[in-house]
Amino acid sequence: MVSDPTSGFGGHRNARSKTVEEVADGFVAPPQYWEIAQPGNTVLAGPRGSGKTTLLKMLQGPALERWDDPLNDRARGLVTYSGILIPADRSWAGQVNSYGDQIEDPDLRKDFGKACFTLHVLRALSACAQQRVSEPPDGARPHDRVSLDPGGQERIVRDVWRTWALTEPVGSFAGLQEALSTLLANFGNLARRSRRHPQAVDELSAHPALDLDLVDITVPFIERFNNAVGQEEHVWAFLIDEVEFLPQGVHVEFRRTMRGRDPRIIQKISLAPYTLVSEELRGTALDGWEGHDVEVVDLTFPEKEDGYEFSRDLIEKEIEERGFTATELLGGPGFFEMPPGRDAYENGSRNATAIKELAEKDESFSAWLAKHKIDPQNPAAVEGDDRAQTLRKAMPIILLRNEYLHLVRGRLGPRTRKSPRTYVGELTTYAICENNPRRLQTFASRLLSRASGDSISDADRFNVLTQVVDEYKLHLRALEVDEGAPDDLLPSQLVETIGKHFQDGVLGEKFDPEPALSFEVMTKAIEGTVLRQILSQLIHYGAVVLITPSRFRLAHTFAPKYTLPVRKGRGHSLKTILPDRLPDEEQMIVGEETSE
């Protein structure tokens, strides 16, 4: 079983394996951080590499103590609660599920999973309490620290240890944490023995951990701690990472248990975006919060330009010791970007030259120009709304067709360029990387390794980009799918089918100023199917991007591979792309004329 098929693609940058101090040292705050940091229940939704774990870790006191940034004061003003990180990732969930698989009774298996999670939360709560009463590291600017003598700790622990299913007394928060670690290990051993020894089943069924109610046992601890340090109304935030990997049913029951029962407890959880694909699934994902009293924060950038400033800051942080600026490393703004303050269509400009050259070799484009009364020798004559509705909207397609098509014996056909300039440049790179921190950092580090002194060529940039895109697509082959899934629906092949379909619209025989670059499907048409499962996986790993609950696009990461513009484009029904995979009566074509 592959826990994370994209782990080889920048997986070493996953914040899960980093200390709080390491995360803080490299942290660049995206705009969404300020929404997430607000007091209140929050769901962070984003694909792999979008920074969910990093953002949760940056809601902890030790992280803010270490973060050396002018924005630190703003963050401290928002994070007025104590962040308790519970890393419920695949490795942890896999361990719990492995133990649970030894239990034949489904009800007992579910209760076991809930109890394991509860014990993990209690251990994290104990660790947070211990950190709060400890001295901060040398040179740190204290945040969320309080004063409590050993006697005060002992009194709190003495009042709660029995209610936490512990069998021996402990005298400190650190002692609580260690005792809970031992209890979890013994609990797992008991589950493993239950398959071989019937008496172990009875022992497990009678274990006091199965009766723990998370709120009932945490509220007295929080209340005693708050009262002891003179902060009666202080809030504690459970920061639950990758909640979808919790044992089945546990995360829904947990949120139902926690929601609104005590104002001193809030939750901030990270969630894979595929759980928000449809309104039906969205309701399930947010179940437990009646009225959805929760802020859902999308860590992607539906409008790519909104992420450029963050991406630039992130790259600058990555390369700050190498003497490059982001623009110097990535090479100018990009082929699709025009410098401000210049007429993009004046004679001799890149756009004017491309229009003239394409008109000379592409009859369908010449016909389109004629239809809109545009002179290819003087495109600057088109102004105002007419330009916006024609040339400006069509310009990315014009540039691509001129770059990648040429006449061969009087027929228009594709040509291959070894190092095309189209996908090189700073802003283009941000868009291709989807403003995704892990992709950006992976690309920057590999590009730096190719730098010769202080010089990087466009050929180097394109070669590294091609390598990164090919490797990313290759990793999609490792995504877990149901045995027997048709070859044409396997993740890598599905991306290939969709990419080639869109490529045909861009570089096809007939010029189309607004080709389809996204696809639409009513999720009920694929509910319970292999296609639904694979599409969910592709969304989770960032290969497919959610635009609306029923509209999707390929990640711009694949734009260089399939010669696509970095834009959302018009929507096509998925039935158009996969005619044999969706029944006609269930597939609705919606938004056929929808464009950017």
Image (cartoon, rainbow, N blue to C red):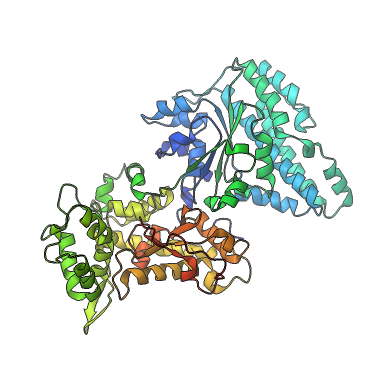
Q: Nearer the viewer, residue 561 or 591?
A: 591
Which residue occupies the extreme right position in the image? 199
Q: Position of residue 328 (x, y in %)?
A: 24, 49
Asked where in the image residue 168 lies, by quadrant, the reply is top right
* Whether residue 386 is visible: yes
Q: Residue at x 47, y 50 (%)?
A: 49
Q: Nearer the viewer, residue 516 or 103?
A: 516
Q: Residue at x 55, y 53 (%)?
A: 278
Report the label total: 0
Q: Quadrant of the C terminus?
A: bottom left
Q: Nearer the viewer, residue 301 or 113?
A: 301
Which residue occupies the extreme top position in the image? 230
Q: Position of residue 594 (x, y in %)?
A: 39, 58
Q: Position of residue 578 (x, y in %)?
A: 50, 71
Q: Residue at x 66, y 34 (%)?
A: 258
Horizontal side of residue 288 vs 313, given as left or right: right
Q: Quadrant of the N terminus?
A: bottom right
Residue 36 position (above or below residue 589): above
Residue 522 position (above or below residue 43): below
Horizontal side of residue 564 vs 160, given as left or right: left
Q: Position of residue 374 (x, y in %)?
A: 17, 64
* Whether residue 120 is visible: no
Horizontal side of residue 206 vs 60, given as left or right: right
